[in-house]
Image (tube, grey):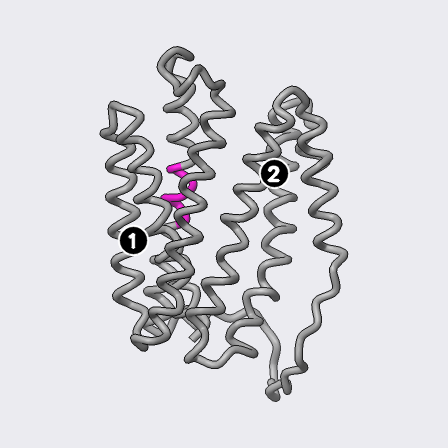
Amino acid sequence: LAAIGGSTSPVQLILALVVFQLAINAVYAPLTALVPDIVPDRQKGTISALATAALPVANIFTALVVVGLSGSLSAQFMVVILVATLLIGLMLREPMVPAEPVNERRFSLAAFRDSRFRVTFLSRLLAESGVALHTLFLLFLLQGQAMQARPIGWSVLETFSALLVISTGAATLGGLVAGPLSDRVGRRSPFVIVGALGMAIGLALLALGSTWTLIVIGQLVFGVFHGVHSATVAAMNAE
């Protein structure tokens, strides 16, 4: 984060982003393994929903920082770095899981032999690609609007942050409803499919929307179904 904030050229920024993403993946890999290791199948939807709610909460926090400290880019990065450092400093206690005997430790793609894993992997890859495209599209959409066309004369960053808060709040709600519901129903696939289709509808509303009402509705629809998809596909993956 410090390197991203201090970048003075496109090359430095790209390298800093690559390092940041590698570090994030290194943190996520062992954390993702916690759910299948210690959570029974009948509760995986609920726990996955709670776990995936962390990302929308982080997005809302970032949006508030961007708006609250919009006059100082360095202050924005300092606050995010400080909070991230405090979170990393928290100790995580977890029950010890008996290790299964393994004769050979090596990189393997054996998981792709399972058809359900292939489906969840592809579904998650496409859905998260859609999330990235959605964020970029939203930013370019706002940059193309005149200030008078934006709500109450907000800046691009303020409007962008407000729309992110709307979609992330909706995603949190969608995930917290769909995760436990998939536990009760005992099936994940219908929720994953509905979530993906709902995300596509939300993106279509954003792409075709010519008024702020349609843009906000598109954000709400995209957010709710992104939460539905994220929580249930994570539970399916853990199973």
Asked if residue 125 is positioned above or below residue 78 in the image, the reply reads: below
Mark 1 sits on what residue?
Answer: 196
Image spot of residue 99 (x, y percent): 63, 85
**Label 1 crowd (10 A; few <14 / some 14-19 / many >=20):** many
The residue drawn where x is 54% and y is 54% is 54
Q: CA distance from mark 1 to mark 2?
A: 28 Å
Image depth: mark 1 or mark 2 in front: 1
Q: Nearer the viewer, residue 2 or 102?
A: 2
Query: To which quarter of the image does residue 213 belong?
Result: top left
Disc 2 residue type (three-letter): Leu
| Part of the protein shown in magenta | 128-134
Label whose residue precedes the other's in the sequence (1 or 2): 2
Asked if residue 12 is positioned above or below residue 203 in the image, the reply reads: above
Q: Secondary structure at mark 1?
A: helix
Disc 1 residue type (three-letter): Ala
**Label 2 crowd (10 A; few <14 / some 14-19 / many >=20):** some
Left or right, 100 with respect to 1, comes to left
Which mark, residue 17?
A: 2
Magenta: main secondary structure: helix
Q: Nearer the viewer, residue 215 or 138?
A: 215
Left or right, 142 with respect to 6, comes to left
The residue drawn where x is 61% and y is 77% is 105
Quadrant position of the C terminus in the picture: bottom left
The residue drawn where x is 29% and y is 37% is 217
Image spot of residue 152 (x, y percent): 42, 17
The residue drawn where x is 74% and y is 42% is 82
Is residue 35 highlighted in magenta?
A: no
